[in-house]
Amino acid sequence: MQANSIGFIGAGNMAGSLVRGLIAKGTPANTIHIADIDSDKLAELAAECGIQATSSEQIASHCEVIVLAVKPQVMESVCRALNHGPQNPLFVSVAAGITLPQLGNWLGEAAAIVRCMPNTPALVGQGASGLYANDNVSDHQRTTAQQLLDAVGLSAWVDSEADLDLVTAVSGSGPAYFFLFMEAMQNTAQEMGLPADLARKLVLQTASGASALAQDSDVALDELRRRVTSPGGTTERAINTFEAGHLRQLVEASLHAARDRSIELAQESDKD
Ligand SMILES: NC(=O)c1ccc[n+]([C@@H]2O[C@H](COP(=O)([O-])OP(=O)(O)OC[C@H]3O[C@@H](n4cnc5c(N)ncnc54)[C@H](OP(=O)(O)O)[C@@H]3O)[C@@H](O)[C@H]2O)c1
């Protein structure tokens, strides 16, 4: 990573994943600093990763990049308490629903801020994140932010902050959609007579195998589907059942609902 010093405020799940990802990709541990009000959690992560446990004040005054990895409810007080002095660090917020205008109010209008929407597979290095930067962020800082999120999976810039609501609906909430689908398949497989552990293994391997096959290919998803759907066969019978149950319309309505809720949540936090 390009930055000489990176500080994390919050040593929870998301910070832990990012730190492990950075170290795995070659960032020297002695350039990573971390602070948390929970001293046990802080000491544990610092010891596991060989990074420097410190205070928010030290991070604010010394680090080139400051990752805000606390829960949305405490973000305002954390930001307002950061006296980041004249060195103009890059702030990277991973908090769901906290907007760039809010962060700018709390950190100062001149602050360079990247807002990210990661997802939970980041915890195992398989995340998908959308990023959006305010106008104060330089090209060098954009590269740094992207390297940070690339350490835990795939990351991509979006064209407007509003697009982060779409990222939230697709990849932010998306893991739960796949869990629901896999849960339904596993339960049915069990009801139909397979042992629970075998049903789980088959469903999980089929999901990751289908994803790997699609990722490894330039072929569109509908064509991949057609290739496993022989006329008159078992897959065709199942697909016809999904179509008759309006699966596509359900997916469409669900993603719209998640997008709308993401917009509402940002508006609610703006009023607080
Ligand atoms: N987990 C995910 O997969 C995921 C996905 C997308 C986005 N995010 C975002 O990532 C952010 C962090 O989520 P998380 O799951 O990592 O949360 P978490 O595990 O609760 O970690 C946050 C840590 O920050 C600490 N903290 C609270 N107030 C603090 C303060 N004033 N100064 C320093 N540390 C403080 C918390 O301590 P206490 O526990 O003692 O309060 C906790 O250890 C959230 O904003 C969330 O929206 C997470």
Image: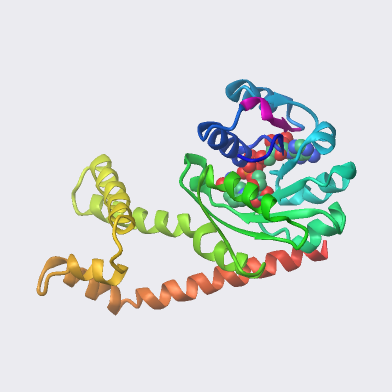
Q: Which sits in the foreground, 106 or 179?
A: 106
Q: Which residue is drawn at 24% across and 68% down?
A: 225
* In magenta segment, residue 183: no
**Residue sitting at 75 percent across and 51 percent down?**
73
**Which percent across, then down, holds residue 69?**
69, 43
Quarter where residue 178 is shown: bottom left
Viewer-closest of 65 and 249: 65
Point out the image quarter for the N terminus.
top right
Q: Decide: is 168 above or below 125.
A: below
The picture places residue 67, in percent across and down from the top left corner, at: 70, 43
Judged from the image, the quadrant occupied by ligand 1 is top right
- Residue 177 appearing in the image: yes
- Horizontal side of residue 184 vs 3, given as left or right: left
Residue 41 is drawn in which quadrant?
top right
Question: Does residue 272 appear left or right of residue 65 in this picture?
Answer: right
> Relative to 42, is 272 above or below?
below
Is residue 82 among the parts visible in the rendering? no
Image coordinates for residue 264, horizontal then vertical, percent: 68, 69
What residue span does the magenta drawing correspond to? 29-36
Q: How is the image coloured?
A: rainbow
Task: Identify the residue shown where x is 48% and y is 76%.
Answer: 253
Instruction: List x then y, in percent, for residue 173.
Output: 52, 59
Callout count: 0
Q: Is residue 87 left or right of residue 258?
A: right
